[in-house]
Image (cartoon, grey):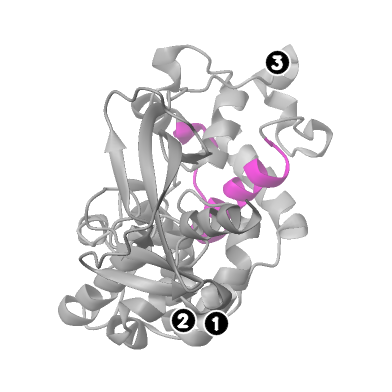
Amino acid sequence: MKEQLITKNILKWYDINKRSLPWRKNVCLQKRQYFTLVSEFMLQQTQVVTVIPYFNRFIKNVPNLKILAKSQNKKLIKLWEGLGYYSRVRNLKKTAQVIIKNFHGKLPNNFEDLISLPGIGYYTASAILAIVFNKPYIPLDGNIERVLKRYLYLKKDKETQKDNLIKKKSIFGISSRSSDYAQALMELGALICKPNNPLCTKCPISKNCKSFKKNDFSIKKNIKKNKNKYFILKIYKKNQRYLLIKNTKFNFLKNLIIFPMEELSNPKNFNQNLNFKMSNMNMNIEIQYSKNNKKLPSSYWVDKKKIKNYILPTFTKKVVKYLESN
């Protein structure tokens, strides 16, 4: 009975307060499948406000699954440029190809087939089943996890482990409007039960929220320590052009265009010029200029004045910006 009341209150709040997002448009099932697939890949580790313009541009240039499956990687990466985690767009294309080959161009509507697709894990499969196929799944993204932890006041290590959260999410109940309900829970976390300064007076379920009753909204975070790594970044310059290479050496920014780099294991007399945070890595970079403009494998001479015309990761662009201002 309590679960039914929670569900009813959350859906009522959602119907009044939901955001107008481009992938929520009222479209045919085929487009709904495609819009959801693209948006879920983009939203992995990326905020909604960041994704919106990228999604609109991507859909305009790659409007359906067939075109996606046949698109050149160069075009797709250019459209993705700035979103980061480029393996997502490569997996998105692979998934499109598998769907066309093995599933007659339609998203599979069962969990086992979905998680067999490149780049789709437990969360994304659950989100697709709920949003596209209206199946009673509650995908545990960061927003829903936060609502759950606060509502039940889950603080201890055992309580906040993923396995326990999956069991405890049954407190939210189920709805015949599973598609709306999954999105409503995400929306509640994003707009109301925010990481800092939650808007409890506007929350439809605050009455029975244990964190609200205790006036304690802190969330236990599993803090990942960034590994300190050290690199020498080599600058070859000729006639206002920089020498860049295709990265086949490092796991980060794989197959993208970067400056020639070497990792140092035990640096001595290291003169740091730049620092980047990338995934769980703290990159300390020393820049070295070289007069020897030799040709390197998979290398390109890039005109600094036409930098916008090249498909470059944000990392490389920031290095160029530093060089130009120093």
Asked whether residue 24 appears in the rendered view, the answer is: no
- Please report the residue visible at 44 percent of the width from the left and 84 percent of the height from the top: 62
Magenta segment range?
169-194
The CA distance from mark 3 to mark 1 is 42 Å
Question: Are dots 3 and 1 in contact, CB under 8 Å?
Answer: no
- Give the numbered dot on residue 216: 3
Which amino acid type corresponds to the residue marked 2 in the rendered image? Answer: Lys
Q: Earlier in the sequence, mark 3 or mark 2?
A: 2
Which amino acid type corresponds to the residue marked 3 in the rendered image? Answer: Asp
- From the image, give the main secondary structure of the stretch colored magenta: helix
Q: Mark 2 — residue?
A: 31
> Percent from the top left, x then y, of residue 254?
29, 56
Q: The residue tagged with tag 3: helix, strand or loop?
A: loop
Choose top left, top right, bottom left or bottom right for residue 64.
bottom left
Which is in the foreground here, disc 3 or disc 1? 3
Q: Using a 10 Å C-alpha cutoff, classify the residue at mark 1 as few (fewer than 14 neighbours), some (14 to 19) or many (20 or more).
A: few
Q: Mark 1 — residue?
A: 27
- Please report the residue visible at 29 percent of the width from the left and 81 percent of the height from the top: 69
Choose top left, top right, bottom left or bottom right for residue 157.
top left
Q: Earlier in the sequence, mark 3 or mark 1?
A: 1
Question: Are dots 1 and 2 in contact, CB under 8 Å?
Answer: yes
